[in-house]
Image (spheres, grey):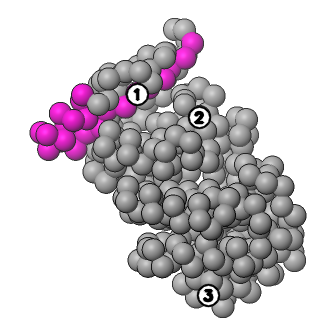
Amino acid sequence: MTYMAVPIAAKDLQEAKNQIGAALAAGAELLELRTDYLHSLSTESVGAVTSEARRAAPNLPIIVTCRDSRQGGANNHPPELRIKILLDALAAGANYIDCEYDSFLPTGNQEKIRLALARSAKARLILSAHNFDAPFDNIGRLYRDISSACPGAIPKLVYTANHINDCFDAIDLLHKTGGERIVLCMGEAGLIVRLIAAKLGSLVTFASIDDDKATAPGQVTLSQFTQLYRAGQIGPKTQLFGVIANPVAHSLSPAIHNACFAEAGLDCLYLPLLVRGAHPEFETFMRNVISRKWLGFRGF
């Protein structure tokens, strides 16, 4: 199963309540509490937000994240405080905590997190790495490093795709690996990976409550994901189609074709495919698609 996760990026408890309510009303399947957005970050404030999420959605999984500013965090909180917040979140009943792989590596942090996880038998650790500039130099090696550092953890690798051809490293990693892992691309060029995450088996994909609440470049809204891109209907056998263009965001083709697929009961998804550049970039994209018949593209 791929969860449709909605980040709650609130500055205080009241804003968190409003965002949680909006996320649940829109059909969120998992809540990510981005506690690094809180203006007064403390055990008490995180506990209050976590309790509110648990009260409002007792059956939904909850991820608590306190992101390092170097990897997209909203505020420059001290490392010691961020680790403490994650430990407190486990005690407060979070299903998952998301810690940066770099932050996990120091021996002291590892010991604290492992001990806290041992006391919370059902909670899981997500070890994440982000690159907001470009793809990772070697995403396969990074995946193996994270998996070796803590075999029970869920690897999460997210990078910016500056061209749609950058997405195939992420697509290949999801295809070649199994189990629980989260692999996504940021930016407009990386949208394809977010939209077909359920086809590729990523544990989570993310959608924002609205355009103003996005916590990473390229997040679409939950309403777009569910109404336009058929979230909940996509699986391993879904056939893919799309419109190739630059620009492409204005195209009505996805809305038209996906509505027709839904009406006809077809397991198909029509995507906007931003292919920048000239003939060489287009040829590379087509070679990437043709060489991956398992990806399931059937027409453009």
Residue occupied by mark 1:
272
Q: Is residue 265 magenta?
A: yes
- Magenta stretch: give its range: 256-277
Q: Amino acid at mark 3?
A: Ser
Please report the residue visible at 71 percent of the width from the left and 85 percent of the height from the top.
116
Which quarter of the picture shows residue 136? top right
Farthest-out residue, bottom = 119
Q: Quadrant of residue 269?
A: top left
The correct choice, above or below, for 63 with respect to 206 in the image is below
- Sequence-earlier tag: 3 or 1: 3
Image coords of residue 263 (percent x, y): 13, 40
Q: Any magenta on residue 275?
A: yes
| Observer-nearest of 164 and 72 | 72
Can residue 193 be seen here? no
Give how far apart the Cα atoms at labels 3 and 1 are: 42 Å
The residue under the point 51% across, 61% down is 18
Which residue corresponds to mark 3? 120
Q: Residue at x 53, y 66 (%)?
A: 17
The tag earlier along the polypeptide, 1 or 2, is: 2
**SS state under label 1:** strand
- Which of the image's four quarters has the C terminus? top left
Q: Which residue is mark 2?
A: 187
Q: Amino acid at mark 2?
A: Gly
